[in-house]
């Protein structure tokens, strides 16, 4: 089983949300369908712009917590290193 740390965004350089999950596909669908009430639904964070695979749930959670403490510029740089066009990476999961 794989675990993931991910960032969803409202748009290019828009609002960002960082999370972790054991099912990146179903979690992204929940963000897109606004099934999660709260921050991501309120601010329209549904575009999967970055993700990283981890061997354990704990490793994904630790990485999530570290990224959440980063300043915005660092998060933008992380996204743009692997996804300079801010494409929605959801389709790449299949």
Image (cartoon, rainbow, N blue to C red):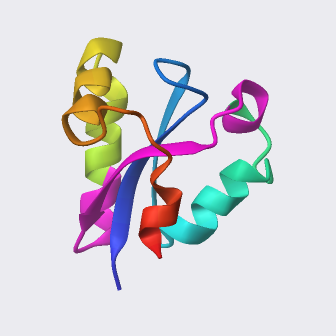
Instruction: From the top left corner, tell me how far across and down residue 66 is, in percent.
Output: 26, 36
26 left or right, relative to 80: right
Picture quarter with the N terminus:
bottom left
Instruction: From the top left corner, tell me how far across and down residue 50 is, in percent.
Output: 36, 45
Residue 50 counted in the magenta span: yes
| Residue plotted at (63% across, 42% down) | 46
Instruction: From the top left corner, tell me how far across and down residue 88 is, in percent.
Output: 50, 47
User: Compared with residue 38, is residue 43 higher up or lower down, i.e. above or below?
Assistant: above
Residue 6 counted in the magenta span: no
| Residue plotted at (36% across, 62% down) | 4
42 left or right, relative to 64: right
Which image quadrant for residue 55?
Answer: bottom left
Instruction: From the top left corner, tell me how far across and down residue 34 is, in percent.
Output: 79, 47
| Residue plotted at (76% across, 37% down) | 41
**Closest to the observer, 79 or 68:** 79
| Residue plotted at (27% across, 30% down) | 80
Tell which residue pokes out farthest to the bottom in this image: 1
- How many numbered circles does the render carry? 0
26 left or right, relative to 5: right
Task: Write the start and end of the magenta stretch as one range.
Answer: 40-61
Tell which residue pokes out farthest to the front in this image: 85
User: Compared with residue 71, is residue 17 higher up or lower down, i.e. above or below?
Assistant: below
Which image quadrant for residue 84?
Answer: top left
């Amino acid at each position: 089983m794989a675990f993931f740390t991910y960032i969803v965004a409202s748009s290019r350089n828009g609002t960002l949300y960082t999370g972790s999950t054991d099912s990146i596909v179903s979690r992204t669908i929940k963000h897109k369908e606004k099934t999660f009430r709260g921050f991501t639904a309120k601010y329209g964070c549904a575009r999967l712009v970055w993700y990283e695979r981890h061997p354990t749930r704990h490793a994904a959670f630790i990485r999530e917590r570290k990224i959440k403490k980063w300043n915005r510029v660092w998060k933008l740089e992380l996204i743009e290193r692997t996804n300079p066009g801010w494409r929605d990476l959801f389709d790449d999961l299949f």
